[in-house]
Image (cartoon, rainbow, N blue to C red):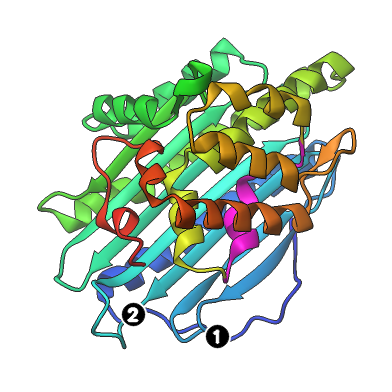
Amino acid sequence: MPLFYIKNKIMKRSKAQSIYARAANSLVEDLQQYFVTHQGEVVDTTGGKSSFQAVEWLRDQGAHGGGVRYVATNETFFNRASVNVSQIHYDDNASKILASATALSTIIHPMNPFAPSVHMHISWTEMKNGKGYWRMMADLNPAIEDAEATALFSECLKKVAPKQYALAAEQGDRYFNIPALERHRGVSHFYLEEYFTDNAQVDFDLAKSLGEAVIDCYVDIFSNANKAHPNPTEMDYEKQRAYHTLYLFQVLTLDRGTTSGLLVHDQNDLGIMGSLPAIVEKDLLISWIGKLISPQDELLKGIINALSDEIPCVVAEAEKLVLAQVVREHYKRHPKALSLQAQGNIIPPTVANHSN
């Protein structure tokens, strides 16, 4: 079993009053523990020792919720790994249109270049007018693609959500497209935005089934890759650094969820930046400046300036905090540039208005 330890003393976080938000919170907390436990078991059985450090953050000193993220500390198996759960609410503020937002957001960047990164996001958003909807995302991100792993991940998504898969794959391909580089982030995408039907229990069950299926599938892919490729070469690590650079580029210049979180508040910058890989190629980022239109070229220059000139270029906590501020200040200066960010078929009001 993985070892858990707490960096910060767990403090009191208020919870949303809605029965739907409470059910969603229980779901994402269960999925968080499920993921961390099963990921840790693979590390343990592969000869390593897993440990995940739990770090809490509070929204307005806990009055409006907060969250806990589990961060992997085993650098033999993980380049970066962060499994985050949060719930914020405004039950005491009648001026807010948002009642609550409850989310699991996770990114695993393995150390082995042959083990793909994975991103998953499952969230429930509830408005004061009674409307509520799910956001469900899952995408596989290999530095060195394995066709069997890609097929396995895609088949997993098709099996767990056969009715939704075609739409989710189309939206995911659109969302994770990087126009300036004429390529995508990732090889298999699933993205349902503002999803709800007339049956709340069926929707809840889909969120639960999707989360568990993606976790099970990814843990197998992670395990198989580490067993099949125990001794990567320096060239393999070079490919990984190049891909991680693209990943950072996409997150900081295109990802609406990241930008929205940064614009709303600055109380969880390290958590929001938890998806960034540990090492990137600064020279590669510099080579992409000319591919961006104004003012996004300014944003990329700011990102580059926030990184050290060391080789390799490590993205540590200090850099994450500076990068968060660079992105935040850029869109405050250029709010119209938000229209240049990635989107599926729908832009939810919480993102469009930054009201959460």
Q: Dot 1 lies on which element?
A: loop
- Quadrant of the image occupied by residue 160: top left
Q: Is residue 272 magenta?
A: yes
Q: Position of residue 127 (x, y in %)?
A: 22, 68
Residue at numbered disc 1: 61
Mark 2 crowdedness (10 Å alpha carbons): few <14, some 14-19, many ≥20: many
Answer with left or right where residue 75 lies relative to residue 52.
right
Find the magenta span and give its range. 267-279
Q: Considering the image in quadrants, where does the N terminus appear? A: bottom right
Relative to the observer, which residue lies in front, 135 or 23?
A: 135
What residue sits 68% from the left and 38% below the top?
A: 109
Q: Nearer the viewer, residue 15 or 261?
A: 261
Q: Position of residue 139 (x, y in %)?
A: 48, 32
Q: Quadrant of residue 302?
A: top right
- The front one of 193 and 229 is 193
Badge number at residue 338 = none
Q: Quadrant of residue 61?
A: bottom right
Cα distance between the residues tagged 1 and 2: 13 Å
Residue on which the image places disc 2: 90
